[in-house]
Image (cartoon, grey):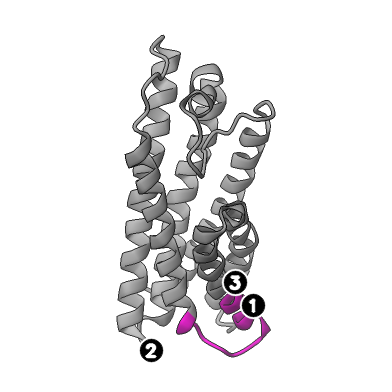
Amino acid sequence: MDKKVIFQAAALAAVVAFIAVIFQAIAGTSLPDGIVAQPGIPVPVEEFVRASNEYPDTTLGFFGADSLFVLSYLLVFIGLYSLIGETARPFAVIGLSAGVLTAILDATENAFFITYALGAKAGLPLTNPDLPILYIITNLKWMAAFATLYTFGVVFPRRNWLDWMLIGLMLLFPLVGVLGVANPGLILVRGLFFLIGMPLFAFYFWRCARGVR
């Protein structure tokens, strides 16, 4: 396939991913204070079930946007694979493999929350969530994401300021991520990398599609 088409698709996917993140933020912030659609760290069961049980429509909107985000960032990873596949194929293969694993784990995590919210809408409120396994899936998802951008970041082209900016973001993401294991307060920062990174990826791939590197 013509790389121009791949880069165009990756640029579009990055724009869609950014829009999906915005809609996630809108849905998440529309919930009352103290209620979180997708808890990132272990919380009491009664706190965990509130979003799904009391606000299932908002929860479904949140995870609908998140599902679109998953599909879109996977295409961005394919764009990164195509970008470095010829010059650093082993890293490209590992990076894309980790990216696919990230998407699978993310979609699996979403499936739990979507099922919980659909159950509440059907009159079957959540009472006994599968918290240990769900938190494990969440942790593995983030570790796979760290591996993806770490792998792509270390072999990313280094030609201009935009390259270096993307390298900085890709390498800072896993660093902040693993520091968040020891300091859970940093977990909230993880999402900012995608909020900032996706517009930059969109611009970068658009330039690549035009033959500008």
Q: Quadrant of residue 96?
A: bottom left
Residue 113, can we see it? yes
Question: In the picture shown, does residue 4 fall above or below 156?
Answer: above
Residue 94 position in % (x across, y down): 32, 73
Judged left or right of residue 26, residue 127 is: left
Q: Does 54 appear in magenta? A: no
Q: Quadrant of the C terminus?
A: bottom right
Residue type pointed to by label 1? Met
Q: Residue 165: which disc?
A: 1
Label 3 Cα crowd, 10 Å radius (few <14 / some 14-19 / many 20+):
some
Where residue 127 sits, quadrant-wise, is: top left
Q: Secondary structure at mark 1?
A: helix
Q: Earlier in the sequence, mark 2 or mark 1?
A: 2
The quadrant the N terminus occupies is bottom left
The answer to whether marks 3 and 2 mark residues whose Cβ atoms lie closer than 8 Å is no
- Compute the Cα span from label 3 to label 2: 21 Å
Relative image position of residue 158 (x, y in whole percent): 56, 89
Instruction: Decide: few, some or many residues near mark 1? Use Cα within 10 Å; few <14, some 14-19, many ≥20.
Output: few
Residue identifier under label 2? 87
**In the image, is 120 to the left or to the right of 165?**
left
Residue 45 percent location from the top left of the image: 46, 27
Is residue 6 visible to the viewer in this orientation of the structure?
Answer: no
Disc 2 crowd, CA 10 A, few/some/many (<14, 14-19, 20+): few
Q: Nearer the viewer, residue 157 or 119?
A: 119
Is 48 left, or right, of 100 in this rendering?
A: right
Label pair 1/3, CB-CB below 8 angstroms: yes
Residue in front for this viewpoint, 8 or 196: 196
Residue drawn at point x = 67 percent, y = 35 percent: 29
Label at residue 169: 3
Magenta range: 154-169
User: What residue is shown at x 61% (from left), y 51% (from top)?
Assistant: 188
